[in-house]
Amino acid sequence: MRSKNVWLFIATAFFFLTVFGRQNSAGIITGIVKDAKTKSPITEAVITLSSNAFKGQKFAVTDSSGTYKINNLPAGNYTIIFEMEGYQKFVRDSVTLQDGMSLGVNYDMVKEGKSS
């Protein structure tokens, strides 16, 4: 009986270490891009992410509902750039993403030649 309890303890400890001991779980940055005046979703806006947490850049394009989503992101500080032809480019710096975090970053784009 004692042997059975020891194995049960070891199996339980292994389970908790495996499930709760994970580090560096991937994060997500998602959001909706709309026209600042009409509040209509903007389709095919380009979202660019850069960070000290990885080399290069990651990209997304908004869908018909103006939604974008970038998965599998390491923790770190991010710069997010929103771009669309006919609209002013917008850069958002110092966006902090922690391990396993899902972060929503929405933006209302302003047409070129207009102020918000």
Image (tube, helix red, strand yellow):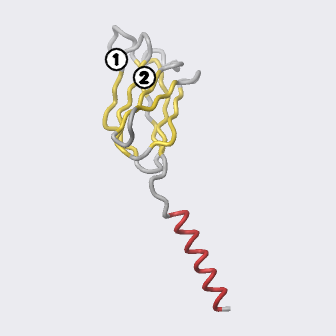
Indicate left or right for 8 with 38 as reference.
Answer: right
Q: Is residue 79 above or below residue 111?
A: below
Q: Nearer the viewer, residue 102 or 47?
A: 47
Q: Which residue occupies 31% across, 33% down?
A: 93
Q: Are marks 1 and 2 in contact (CB under 8 Å)?
A: yes
Quadrant in the rendering for residue 89? top left
| x and y percentages locating residue 5 in the rendered image | 63, 86
- Name the amino acid type tagged 2: Asp
Q: Is residue 92 above or below residue 113?
A: below
Q: Nearer the viewer, residue 94 or 48?
A: 48
| x and y percentages locating residue 42 in the rendered image | 51, 19
Q: Secondary structure at mark 1?
A: loop
Q: Nearer the viewer, residue 22 or 110?
A: 22
CA neighbours of label 2 inside 10 A, class few (<14), some (14 to 19), many (20+)? some
Indicate left or right for 116 with 27 as reference.
Answer: left
Which corner quadrant holds the N terminus?
bottom right
Q: Which residue is mark 2?
A: 108
CA neighbours of label 1 inside 10 A, class few (<14), some (14 to 19), many (20+)? few
The number of numbered discs placed on residues in the rendered structure image is 2
Q: Which residue is mark 1?
A: 116
Quadrant in the rendering for residue 63? top right
| x and y percentages locating residue 8 in the rendered image | 63, 80
Q: Is residue 105 above or below residue 16?
A: above
- Work out which residue is located at the far front of the displayed protein and give it: 55
Q: Which residue occupies 48% across, 20% down?
A: 45
Q: Which residue occupies 67% across, 86% down?
A: 4
Q: Is residue 26 above or below residue 13?
A: above
